[in-house]
Image (spheres, rainbow, N blue to C red):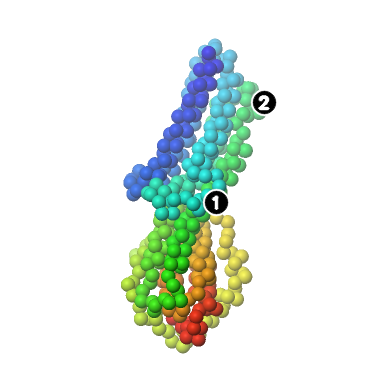
Amino acid sequence: AAKVSVKSYVNTAFSYLMQDISDSLLNVLKRDGVEGHSLEAALDASTKILLQGGRNFLQDVRKILDDELEILNKLRELISDWVQEGFQDFFKQLQLKFQSFSGRNDLAHIQNHSFVEGSQGDKAFPGLVLVLAQLYAFVDRTAIPQINEELASSFSPGVGGYEHGLCFVSRETSRKFRSASESFLHMYVKMRTQRISHLLKKRFTTPNWVKHKEPREVHMFVDLFLQELKDMGNEVKEILPHGTQKHHRVDSNGSSNLSLSRSNSIPDEILSRSNTQKGRSQQLFETHLAKLFKQKVEIFTKVEYTQESVIMTMVKLCLKSLQEFVRLQTFNRSGYQQIQVDIQFLRTPLKEIVEDEATMDFLLDEDKGLKEQTILDYSKKDKGLLAQ
C-alpha cells in the first residue's frame, strides 16, 4: 500500500506540473494584444513553473524522507529511483506535449495549415512555435542542469539510483531537447516565410504584367510585406536576446522601428536621373554582379538564437522568394518600372531592421536587375528609372 501511495504521489505531482505548463503555453493562442497573454509572459510563466515546480516537488520528497518513518526508510532506495524515473518520464512526456502543440511532426504539412489566412489563434500559432523553440532551449541549457544538481543534493551517494547509475539520463535528454529546439526555430522561420511567400504569389500571379500601366505609386503589397516583417520582428524581440550587431541605423529620434507608411505617389526625383547617375547605377550593379559567387557563400547561414540572426534570415529568404516570383514573369516596360519602384521603396525600411546591410543591398539589386532579359520592348525600357 505504501509503495502504491508513494508512486501515485510522484505521478500525480508530475501530471499537475505538466498541466500548469500546458495552460501557460495555450494562452499564446488566446492573445490579441491582451496584456498577460504575450509571448514573453507565456515563456516566463512556463520556465518559472518548470523550475519552481521541480524544486517544490523535490523539497516535498525530502520532507517525507526526513520524517524518518520506518516504512518509508525501507522504501528510501525505491523512492529515489521513482523520483529520478519520474523526471525522466516527465521530460519525455513534455517533449511529446510540445510536439502536439505544434500540430504536426512533419514540417511539410505546414503548407496546408490554415494559419496563412486563418483565425486569431491561427495567426498566433507561429508565435507559439517560437516560444516552444526557446522553451526547448531553456530545458536543455538551464532546467536539466539545475534539476540534476537538485537530485544530487537530495539523494546522497549510496542510495539505490547511484549504486546502479542515475535513472535520470540528463545528457541524452538534453541532446533531444537541443535538437528539437533547433527544429522548432527553423519551423518558425519556415512558417513566417511561407506566409510572406503566399502574399508574394498573389501579388505576382494576379496582374497581367504584359499590359501593366505606368506606375503611379508604390503597390499596396509593399505595406503588407512590411507589416508581416514587423509582426515577425515583434515576436522575435519578445522572445530572443540581442546578438552582436555589425550595422545598425537609427533615425534622428533614436528610433529604429520599421516604418509601414508609404507615399501616395512616386516622388519626381525618383522618376528622373542624370546621365551621370545612370552610369554610376550600372557600374554599381556590375560590381554587385561580379561579387555574386562570393556573396552567395554568405547569404544563407546558420540561424542563431538571436533577434538579429532570425530577422536577417527571414529578410534574406523573403527577398530570394521575391526574386523567384519576379524571375517567372514577363513584364512590359511599365511593369518592370513598377517592380523597380516597389523594390526601391523597400530599401530604406529594410535597412532599419537588418544587421547585414551589404547582403540585403545585394539581394535587392539582384531583384531589380533580374528581369532585363525578359522585358518586352527591350529597346524602350528605362534602365535609369530609379536613383540608387
Q: Which residue is mark 2?
A: 164
Q: Is residue 234 above or below residue 336?
A: above
| Residue at 42% across, 84% down | 273
Q: Is residue 111 above or below residue 386?
A: above
| Residue at 62% across, 25% down | 161
Residue 91 in the image: state x and y as whole percent: 54, 35
Q: Given the image, on which type of amino acid does mark 2 rest?
A: His
- Between disc 2 and disc 1, whose residue precedes? 1
Q: Which mark is residue 108?
A: 1
In this view, the residue in front, 335 or 294, is: 335
- Tell me how far mark 2 sits from mark 1, CA to CA: 43 Å
Residue 109 in the image: state x and y as whole percent: 52, 49
Residue 301 left/right relative to 259: right
| Residue at 64% across, 26% down | 162
Which numbered mark, 2 or 1, is in the foreground of this view? 1
Q: Given the image, on which type of amino acid does mark 1 rest?
A: Ala
One can see residue 298 in this view: yes
Q: How many numbered circles are shown?
A: 2
Farthest residue, direction top: 70
The quarter of the picture where the C terminus appears is: bottom left
Callout 1 crowding tier (Cα within 10 Å): few <14, some 14–19, many ≥20: few
Determine whether the residue tagged by mark 1 lies in a helix, strand or loop: helix
Residue 287 in the image: state x and y as whole percent: 57, 77
Q: Is residue 65 above or below residue 239?
A: above
